[in-house]
Amino acid sequence: MSAVEESGQAYPDTRASYIVLGLDPGRDKCGFAALERTNDGTIRVLMQSVIETANLEQEVAAAITKYSPSRLIEGNGTTSKDARTRIERAVPSLAITVIDEYRTTEQAKKEYWKAHPPKGLRRLFPTTMQVPPVPVDDFVAVILATRYLSSAQPPSQRGGGPRERWGESPARQSKQHDAASAGASKGGTTP
């Protein structure tokens, strides 16, 4: 069984670089990326693409062969549990870290327009009012992996509890905890 984490773990600095895979799972398509963090802190994208969910296991296996990643960073969206189960069955030795996807789609749209500025008449309109002509799931995968690699101090070193998720602010977690506690005190159930 693979090592699935919802709390972070410090990555080793003993290697010349640290490579992770990023995954934004979806029902029909997934954003998929491979990123490298060197010892000097530089992060670079080795590969990013939008893949068909039906080919998820094959794509992950091919990326493992090509890049030898240390782990897979997965967004916590609605289809993440299904994707994680499929990957665990196909590649049980791959460590998986689940991180918060909050606002990654909006950020991915901005990154898309930076990489592909509008041309012609479209450049006259603000990009915030435009929809990218292609899916941006690959940009989301890059953002998820970058969040993990850029995190100066993983939750496990901040004293966060075992349910703290990577990339989720303690203030947001506190609000969720307070809401769950309030529901429990009124006879409701907690998630």
Image (cartoon, grey):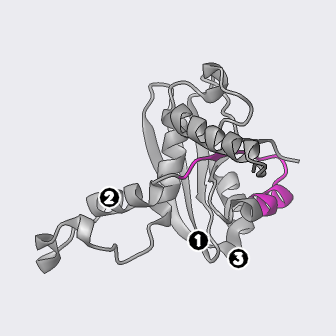
State the image coordinates of residue 30 (x, y, percent, origin top left): 59, 67
Q: Dot 1 corresponds to which residue? A: 51
| Front-most of residues 21 and 143 | 143
Kind of residue at badge 2: Lys
State the image coordinates of residue 46 (x, y, percent, origin top left): 49, 51
Q: Residue at x 86, y 59 (%)?
A: 89
Which comes sooner in the sequence, label 2 or label 3? Answer: 3
Q: Dot 3 corresponds to which residue? A: 54
Residue 14, quarter of picture: top right
State the image coordinates of residue 48 (x, y, percent, origin top left): 50, 60
Report the magenta residues as a range. Answer: 84-101
> Could you tell me which secondary element the residue under label 2 belongs to?
helix
Q: Is residue 182 above or below residue 112?
A: above
Residue 181, quarter of picture: top right
Residue 145 is a magenta residue: no
Real-space Cα separation, disc 1 to disc 2, in angstroms: 21 Å
Which comes sooner in the sequence, label 1 or label 2? Answer: 1
